[in-house]
Image (tube, rainbow, N blue to C red):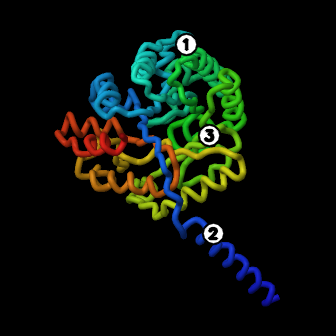
Amino acid sequence: MRFKKNKIAFFILLLVLSFFLYFFVGRAPEAKEIKWGVTFSQKHARDLGLDWKESYLAILDDLQVKNIRLIAYWDLLEPENGTYNFEDLDWQIQEAAKREVATALVMGIKVPRWPECHIPEWAKDLNKEQQQEKVLVLDKELVSRYKNYPNIDYWQVENEPFFPFGNCPWFDFGFIKEEINYVRSLDPDSPVLVTESGELSPWVLAGFLGDKVGTTMYQKVYVSQLKSYLHYKLPPVFYWRKAQIIKKLFGKEVIVIELQAEPWGPKLLYDTSLEEQAKTMDLQQFRKKIEFAKKTGLKEFSLWGVEWWYWMKVQHNRPEIWNEARNSLN
C-alpha cells in the first residue's frame, strides 16, 4: 500500500514538473511581422472627459494605427425598444474606412469596458430569453449594415463570455454558441473571434466555437478580493505554448485583443490619482509590455488604453506614452 502511494505521488510530481517545464521554460520563436492595433471605446473616452471624436481622429491621424477594434454598445445603439441610432458607430467605421484601417467590431450583450454588459434601461426588466432575442436582432442589424465595408476584418461576438467578470444578469453557454453561429451565418466570409482571459483560462471553449481566438495579456492588476496588487509572473513562452495547443487541437490562430497599456487600480481610472495609476502603468512599464509581447511569438496585438494615453497627453501634459505608442505601432 505504501509503495502504491509513493508511486502515485511520484506520478503527480512528474506531471507538475512536466507542466512547469512546458509552460515556463524555453523561448518562443520571434514573430517576423507583428500586426499592432488598438481598441477604442467611445464611452471610455467620454467618461474620461474627452471629446471622443477628437480622440478618435487623433488615433487615426496622429498615431496612424492600421488596425482598430470598435465596440457596438447596445444601450447607445438602441436607446428605445426598436429605435436604432447608428450615427456615431457609422462615423467611426467610415472614418476608419477612409484611411483603410482594418476594423474589428465587438457585439453582443457583454462587450469591453465596465460594466461589461451595457444593457439599455428599457431592456433591463426583460427576462433572459427576451433579452437574448433582442441581442440577436441587433446582431443582424450590425452585420447587415457593415459587412460590405472593405475594412471589416472580423466580428467579435461577446467579450470574454466564459469569464465571470462584470455586472451581467446571466450566463448562458447555449446562447453564446447560438449567437456565434448566427453571426457566422449572416456573414460567412468574415471570421468570428471569440475571446477568453489570457491568464485564467485554457482558451479551449474559444478554440472550439470561434474562427479565431482572442486573449488578454495582463501583468500587473489590482485584485479587490485580495485588496492588493497582483503581478502575474508568466514568461512570454507561456502564451506561445498555449497558442500552439489551440492550433493543434482546433487549427485556430490566437491573437491578443487586450495587451495591457493602461493602469488597473482599485478604482476606475477617472477616480484614481496619477500616483496610484503609475503603480501599474507608466512609460517604463509600457515599454516593457511591448517588449514582452514581442517575445511571445504571437503575431497580432490590440493595445488596451489608447484613450488614457490621449487623456494623459491633453489633460495632464504628459504625452510620453502617446509619443512612444506612435513609434511602437508603426
Tell me which residue sits at (54%, 44%) in the image: 255
Most distant residue in the top direction: 83
Mark number displayed over residue 212: 3
Q: Earlier in the sequence, mark 3 or mark 2?
A: 2
Circles 3, 1 touching at the beta carbon (< 8 Å): no
Q: Quadrant of the N terminus?
A: bottom right
Tell me which residue sits at (47%, 12%) in the image: 85
Look at the numbered disc 2 and give the secondary structure of its residue.
Answer: helix
- Which residue is identified by label 2? 19
Q: Earlier in the sequence, mark 2 or mark 1?
A: 2
Image coords of residue 94 (percent x, y): 43, 17
Image coords of residue 27 (percent x, y): 52, 65
Q: Is residue 50 above or below residue 16?
A: above
Position of residue 18 in the picture relative to residue 61 (left or right): right
Mark number displayed over residue 81: 1
Most distant residue in the front direction: 32
Position of residue 193 in the picture relative to residue 295 (left or right): right
Residue mark closest to the camera, 3 vs 1: 3
Q: Quadrant of the C terminus?
A: top left
Measured in 3D between alpha carbons, the distance from the residue under mark 3 to the one under mark 2, in whole angstroms, is 25 Å
**Residue 194 appears in which quarter of the rendering?**
top right
Most distant residue in the left direction: 317
Look at the numbered disc 1 and give the secondary structure of its residue.
Answer: loop
